[in-house]
Image: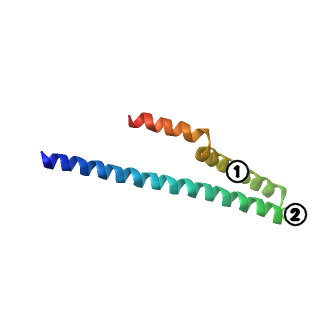
Amino acid sequence: MKKNCNNKTENEQSQKSIDQQEKIDREKRRRLMIIGASCGLVLCLTTLVAFKKEMSEEIVGIIYMITGIFGACLMEAYNFEFGFLKKKFRNKNKSKRD
């Protein structure tokens, strides 16, 4: 009986450590996503400001499009991190666990 009880607590502890590690991994991915989108956006804007006169209109249009994509990624990451989507995602995960 005691072995069964100890085994159960060990399983609960290992599950808690797995959950904590998953939470840490999610935080790392979120930060990496925000940093990557921010760097891409800044790099595109800097390129446009610095070299717009030397580039053809097609290249400028492509860089504007890429800038918009990075801006949308940053907006989505920000909304997920601080906005409505995070609450919705949390509620969805809570219902899956139950």
In the picture as drawn, the residue positioned furthest to the left comes out as 1
Q: Is residue 40 left or right of residue 93?
A: right
Q: Is residue 78 left or right of residue 6?
A: right
Q: Amino acid at mark 2?
A: Lys
Q: Residue at x 68, y 52 (%)?
A: 70
Which element type, helix, strand or loop, lies under badge 2? loop
The image quadrant where one finds the N terminus is: top left
Q: Earlier in the sequence, mark 1 or mark 2?
A: 2
User: Residue 69 at x, y = what percent?
Assistant: 69, 50
**Mark 1: few, some, or many residues within 10 Å (few <14, many ≥20)?**
some
Q: Residue at x 44, y 37 (%)?
A: 94
Q: Is residue 77 left or right of residue 54?
A: left
Q: How is the image coloured?
A: rainbow
Q: Which residue is mark 2?
A: 53
Image height check: is 93 above or below 25? above
Q: Which residue is mark 1?
A: 71
Q: Check contact, mark 1 vs mark 2: CB within 8 A.
A: no
Q: Nearer the viewer, residue 27 or 10?
A: 10
User: Residue 62 at x, y = what percent?
Assistant: 75, 54
Q: Residue at x 84, y 62 (%)?
A: 52
The image quadrant where one finds the C terminus is: top left
Q: Residue at x 72, y 62 (%)?
A: 43
User: Residue 75 at x, y = what percent?
Assistant: 67, 47
Q: Amino acid at mark 1?
A: Gly
User: Residue 89 at x, y = what percent?
Assistant: 52, 39
